[in-house]
Amino acid sequence: MKTLSIIDGSGFMFRARYAFPPLLNAAGQNQNVVYGTLRMLLKLINESADYFVIARDSPTKTKRHEQYQDYKANRKKMEDEFKVQIPLLRELINELQIPNIAAPGYEADDIIATLTKKFQKKSDLMIQVISSDKDLKQLLNENVVVTDPLKNLTTRTPDFEKEFGFPPTSIVDYLALLGDSADNIKGVSGIGAKKASDLIQKYHTIENIYQNLEFLSPDLKNKLKEGENDAIFSKKLIELLEVPELESTSLESLALNIDFQKWEKILIEKRGFKGIKKTFDELKKKYTQPQQLGLF
C-alpha cells in the first residue's frame, strides 16, 4: 500500500521557530525556520512517503476571519524575524519542486481536508495527515491516520474512540461545546471537557443536543440555552471547508520523485545546510533511481 503524506506547513514552521537556534547565512540573515523546516521534511520523506504535499495557509484574509474578526486574535503577533523567513522557505520549497498548495481565503486545514476526502476512497492508498491540530482528527477513518509531530504519536480511529468515547466526526460538535482557545473559539461557557464528552456520547451532534434540552438538568439546560448561538457559530468555524481550486489536483501530481543531484547542490552547496547531510545521505540511499520531481 502506498502512502500520501499531507503536511501542515504552518505548524512545521512554528515548531522550527522554537526548536532550532538562530542560524545565520553569509548575509547575516537568520534562517533557522528555513533550515529547521527542511530538516523535519527530509526526515518525514525518509520515513515513508510515495506522495507528498505541504498545505499552506492563505497569505490573505481567510473566510473564517471574514466571518469572525476575532478568530485567532489571542495569538501573539508574528515576530519580524520569523515573518521574513516565510517567503524564503516558500522560495526554497519551490526551488526543490516539493509539491505545496495554498488557496486564497483558505487555511492549511481546509486544504488538508479537501485532499484527504478527495483521495481517501482509493483502496491501495494510506493517507497520513501530519499536524498537531486536534480538529483534523475529524478526518480519521480506516484509510486515514493523523500523526502529531510534537508528540511523535499516530492516532487511528480505534485510538480516538478509546480516548473520547465517540467517533472522530463528532469532534467538531465536541469542540463547538468546549471551545478552542488556540483559535479563540468560545464554545459554551461553563461546559468543560467531561460534560462536553458526555453530551456528545449521548446525543452525537449540537443540533440533537438542543432538540433534547428537556431531558437535561436545569443548570445544564440554562448554560446551553445561554450559549446556543456561540455553540452553533463555533461549530461553523470548526468545520473544515472544501477548497474548489483543488478539484483538478491529481494524485500523480503529488508523486515524490527526487533529483538528488539538484537537491544536494541547492541545500548543501548553495544554502550551506551541512547539518542535514546525514539525513540527506540516508534518504539518497533509500531511492535507487533518482528522478526529477514533478510540479503539481
Image (cartoon, rainbow, N blue to C red):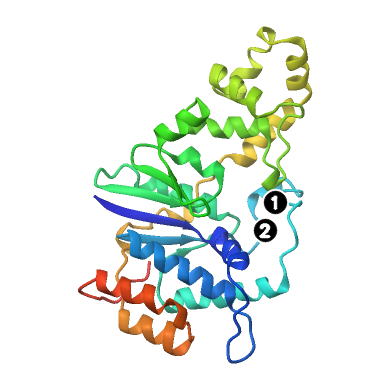
Which mark identifies residue 121?
none
Which residue in the structure is indicated by mark 2?
A: 61
Characterize the local packing of mark 1: few (<14), some (14-19) or many (20 or more) Cα atoms within 10 angstroms: some
Whether residue 293 can be seen here: no
* Relative vertical location of residue 105 with respect to residue 45 in this rendering, above or below: above
Q: Position of residue 143 (x, y in %)?
A: 33, 41
| Residue for point 57% across, 39% down | 239
CB atoms of marks 1 and 2 within 8 Å? yes
Residue 283 in percent (x, y) is at: 32, 71
Residue 250 figure quarter? bottom left
> The residue under label 2 is which amino acid type?
Lys
Where on the picture, by quarter, is residue 224?
Answer: top right
Question: Can residue 169 be seen by looking at this rendering?
Answer: yes
Q: Residue at x 68, y 47 (%)?
A: 183
Q: Residue under circle 1? A: 65
Residue at 58% in and 70% down: 20
Q: Position of residue 263 (x, y in %)?
A: 37, 80
